[in-house]
């Protein structure tokens, strides 16, 4: 039983500072964070695995911190660099932005998917990269990881937004009714008061 719990723990990654936990795909192992590229210190963790087609090259998965929170406004295609396109993926019931970039490294065609996850404490990017021939599998791995990623968001869901709007409308209606009642009472008192000559 203890061995089973240890194996499950090894298949998960978490970060208490950023407030998330996620499951790693089967067969993925930790690799040095330098493979993530980007600014030094941004990589929280990196893993690599062969997935279902080991003879076609590894898929690399990384988590990078963004040093900010994300608003609900989505990226526009004009915000993206060349050879990149905007993709929408799902996380925690929300549509979030992901960027697909096709590039070549040492003569090999590579596809990189970068999903921006709006965690409450600080947004993160979940990056999945692999040979372009395996782009569909790389996107499937990204979606699987996002499906397992648990953490609080600074975005409100549609239901939460509707509840908040409902609460605001309730307060506005309540205040309006209260003001109407006060006005009626004041009007009655003025009408019932004897006039001074």
Image (tube, rainbow, N blue to C red):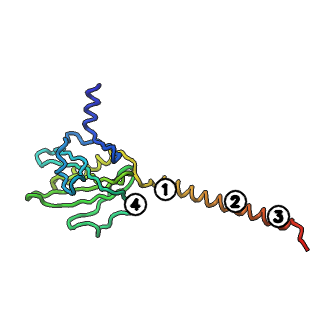
Identify the residue position indicated by label 4 in the image: 72
Asked whether the residues under the numbered discs 4 and 1 touch, taking CB atoms below 8 Å apart as contact, a structural biologist would say no
Distance, label 2 to label 3, CA atoms, is 17 Å
Identify the residue position indicated by label 3 in the image: 189
Q: Is residue 124 left or right of residue 170?
A: left
Residue 72 position within the rendered picture, expressed as x and y whole percent measured from the top left: 40, 60
In the rendered image, the quadrant that contains the N terminus is top left
Numbered disc 1: secondary structure: helix
Numbered disc 4: secondary structure: loop
Residue shown at the point (23%, 49%) measured from the top left = 62
- Precedes in sequence: disc 2 or disc 3: 2
Distance, label 4 to label 2, CA atoms, is 35 Å
- Precedes in sequence: disc 3 or disc 4: 4
Q: Is residue 52 visible?
A: no
Crowd rating for badge 1 (residues with CA inside 10 Å; few <14, some 14–19, many 20+): few
Numbered disc 2: secondary structure: helix
- Precedes in sequence: disc 4 or disc 1: 4
Crowd rating for badge 3 (residues with CA inside 10 Å; few <14, some 14–19, many 20+): few
Q: Residue furthest front?
A: 197
Numbered disc 3: secondary structure: helix
Residue shown at the point (51%, 56%) measured from the top left = 162
Residue shown at the point (27%, 52%) measured from the top left = 126
Identify the residue position indicated by label 2 in the image: 178
């Amino acid at each position: 039983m203890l061995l089973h719990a240890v194996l499950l723990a090894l298949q998960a990654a978490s970060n208490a500072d950023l407030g998330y936990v996620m499951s790693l795909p089967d067969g993925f192992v930790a690799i040095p964070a330098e493979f993530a590229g980007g600014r030094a210190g941004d990589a929280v963790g990196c893993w690599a695995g062969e997935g279902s087609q080991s003879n076609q090259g590894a898929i690399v998965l990384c988590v990078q911190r963004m040093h900010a929170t994300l608003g609900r406004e989505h990226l526009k295609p004009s915000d993206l660099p060349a050879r990149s396109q905007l993709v929408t993926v799902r996380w925690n019931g929300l549509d979030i932005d992901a960027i697909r970039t096709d590039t070549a490294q040492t003569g090999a065609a590579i596809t990189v998917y970068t999903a921006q996850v709006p965690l409450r404490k600080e947004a993160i990017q979940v990056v999945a990269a692999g040979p372009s021939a395996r782009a569909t599998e790389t996107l499937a791995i990204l979606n699987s990881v996002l499906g397992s990623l648990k953490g609080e968001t600074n975005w409100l869901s549609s239901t939460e937004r509707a509840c908040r709007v409902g609460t605001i409308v309730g307060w506005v209606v309540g205040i309006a009714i209260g003001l109407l009642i006060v006005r009626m009472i004041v009007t009655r008192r003025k009408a019932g008061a004897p006039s001074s000559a």
